[in-house]
Image (cartoon, rainbow, N blue to C red):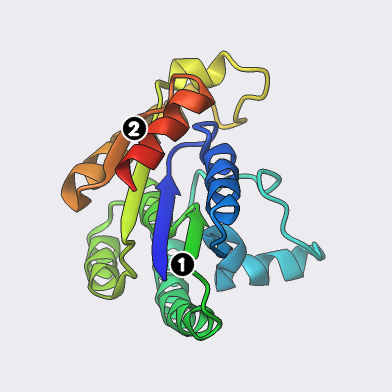
Amino acid sequence: MRFITISGVDGSGKSTQLALLREHIEKKGCTAAYFHATEFSAANRLARLFRGQKAFEPGKDRAVTDASWLSVVLREKFLLLDFLRFRFLRRRLEREHVDYLLSDRSFYDSLVNLSYLSDAWIVRVGRYVLDLFLPEADKAFYLDIDPEIVMSRERVPEQGIGYLEAKRALFLAQAKRRNFIVIDAGRSKEAVFSDILGSL
């Protein structure tokens, strides 16, 4: 089973490209499972339970833009638990002979979020530990887009351009460190998808 992730800031087109990729894979007669790190997150599931939210709706959860270092450390612990849970999920899908596992908002995105929330030394130590257990993708794409383009669209992220610029810088640093396939997402969805298919 191939594990493929698509990462990027809000509004970069991750969900659109994942839907196109899934359709393409299924047309070839292969099977594809969908994974969303935010939906899968034990910490987020617990938070939704406390809020009385029964189901996860992509794009409906407000992004966390501020947190104490203690809160970030707790999120790191939950993320480590998610890594373990993911290993069991991956094994189950392999036993079911699923060909592809497609990830929207992968664990790479979770690490970028933690970096955005805090750079305290204790948090950096936690991220180093997380790196040791991080489930690596077979192919990891980063959809790079100028925040100005995102903010000019009909549906704009409520966090504003400063948030998008900071997250983009963190993603670009991670993309370089992890050898992501970086794709210019400021073009048509067809052009972006053509680049993804060409890199598979």
Using the image, determine if residue 47 lies above or below residue 62.
below
Measured along the vertical axis of the image, is residue 186 above or below residue 133? above
Give the number of callouts. Answer: 2
Q: Is residue 48 left or right of residue 119?
A: right
Cα gap from disc 2 to disc 1, whole angstroms: 29 Å
**In the picture provided, is 161 more to the left or to the right than 157?**
left
Q: Earlier in the sequence, mark 2 or mark 1?
A: 1
Which residue is rendered at x = 56% and y = 82% of the image? 96
Q: Nearer the viewer, residue 62 or 193?
A: 193
Label number found at residue 197: none
At a point 30% along the width and 70% down the height, the residue shown is: 130
Using the image, tell me which numbered label, if any, was put on residue 183. 2
Residue 36 coordinates in the image, percent (x, y): 56, 59
What kind of residue is marked 1? Arg
> Which residue is pictured at 50% across the width and 20% down the height?
188
For disc 1, the marked residue is: 75
Q: Callout 1: helix, strand or loop?
A: helix
The percent position of residue 134, horizontal first and vertical second, equals 31, 69
Residue 7 is drawn in which quadrant?
top left
Residue closest to the eye, 6 or 105: 6
The local crowd at label 2, few if under 14, some if 14 to 19, many if 20 or more residues have their Cα within 10 Å, is: some
Residue type at mark 2 is Ile
